[in-house]
Image (spheres, rainbow, N blue to C red):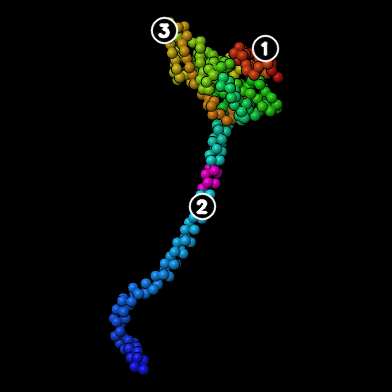
Amino acid sequence: MAAALLSIALMVLDHRRNHLEHLRSTLAVLLYPVQYLAALPVLLSESAGNAIINRNQLQSERDRLEEENLLLRARLQKFEALEAENMRLRGLLDSSFKVGDRVLIAELIAVEQDPFRQQVLINKGETSGAFEGQPVLDANAVVGQVTHINPFTASVLLITDAAHALPVQVNRNGLRTIALGTGLINRLELPHLPNNADIQVGDLLVTSGLGGGFPPGYPVAEVIEVRRVPGQPFAAVIAQTTAHLDRIREVLLVWTLDPGNRPAIQAGTDEPSRETTTEPAKEAVE
C-alpha cells in the first residue's frame, strides 16, 4: 500500500513539476551498461548473421563478375580481331581505288611450310577468273604472282622466293634493274648494279612494267643497304619489301594485262622461271 502511494506521489510530482527529470537522466546513464550487456548477445547474433549473408552475397557477386569479365574479355578479343580485319579490308579497298584496275580480294588459307619456299595458297581460283602469272598485291605493295590455279584456289609465289625475279626501277631516277628473291621473307637483292650506279639507301623500288609480268609503278621494296667494294664490278644492294609478307591475311588479285601480255609459266612447275618473269610470253594463257 505504501509503495503504491509513493509511486502515485512520484508520478504527480514528475508530471506537474518535472522534479524527477534529473534523477531519471542519472539513472539512465547508470543503467546504460547493463542495458547494453543485456542486448549484446542479440546484437552479436544479428551482426554475425549479416556478415555471413554479406559474405555469401559478395562471393556470389564476385563469381558473377568474374564470369562476366571472362566473357567480355573473350568478346573483346574477337572485336579486336574484327577491328584489325576491318582495317586490313579498308586498306585493301583503298588500295583498289588507287590501282584503278579490276581487282578481287582473296584470303590466305595456307602458307608453305618449307623454309626454302615462299609460297601461299589463296581462296580464289579459276572460277573467280584468276590466271597463271597474275599480279598479286596487298594494301601497300606487290606481294607476288599466281603460279598455279585450281577451280577454287590458287598458289601465289611471293617476290621473296629464291626462284622469283622481278623487273624494277628506282623511283627517284628511273634506274632499271632486276630484284631477286633471297628466300628471306622480307629481303630482296639487286645483284647486277655497277659500283657507280646511282642508287642509295632509302630509294623506293617500283615495278618497271618490262617483261609483261607486272604493270609499271607498283611499289616493291625500299633499299636498306648499299655496299660498294673497291675492285668489284658490282655493288651489293639489299632491299626490304614494302609489303608485309609475314603478316598478310588478305590480298588483291589484279587484272591489268591483256591476255597476249600474260607471262608464261613453265609447264609442270608451280613457279615461273627467271626468264619468263622478265620477258613477255609468246603465247596467251587462257
Q: Within the image, what quadrant is residue 253 found in?
A: top right
Tag 1 or tag 3, which sits nearer the N-term? 3
Badge 1 is on which residue?
A: 282
Circle 3 Cα neighbour tier, 10 Å, few/some/many (<14 / 14–19 / ≥20): few
Tag 1 or tag 2, which sits nearer the N-term? 2
Amino acid bearing label 1: Lys
Badge 3 is on which residue?
A: 230
> Quick check: marks 2 and 1 in contact, CB under 8 Å?
no
Q: Quadrant of the N terminus?
A: bottom left
Circle 2 Cα neighbour tier, 10 Å, few/some/many (<14 / 14–19 / ≥20): few
Amino acid bearing label 2: Asp
Marks 2 and 3: which is nearer the front? 2
Badge 2 is on which residue?
A: 63
Magenta span of residues: 68-76
Using the image as rendered, state which of residue 63 and residue 169 is in the foreground. 63
Q: Secondary structure at mark 2?
A: helix
Q: Residue at x 62, y 30 (%)?
A: 109
Image height check: is 73 above or below 31?
above
Indicate the position of residue 97 as horizontal and vertical percent values.
58, 29
Q: CA distance from mark 2 to mark 1?
A: 71 Å
Q: Residue at x 62, y 18 (%)?
A: 271
Q: Residue at x 61, y 23 (%)?
A: 156
Q: Secondary structure at mark 1?
A: loop
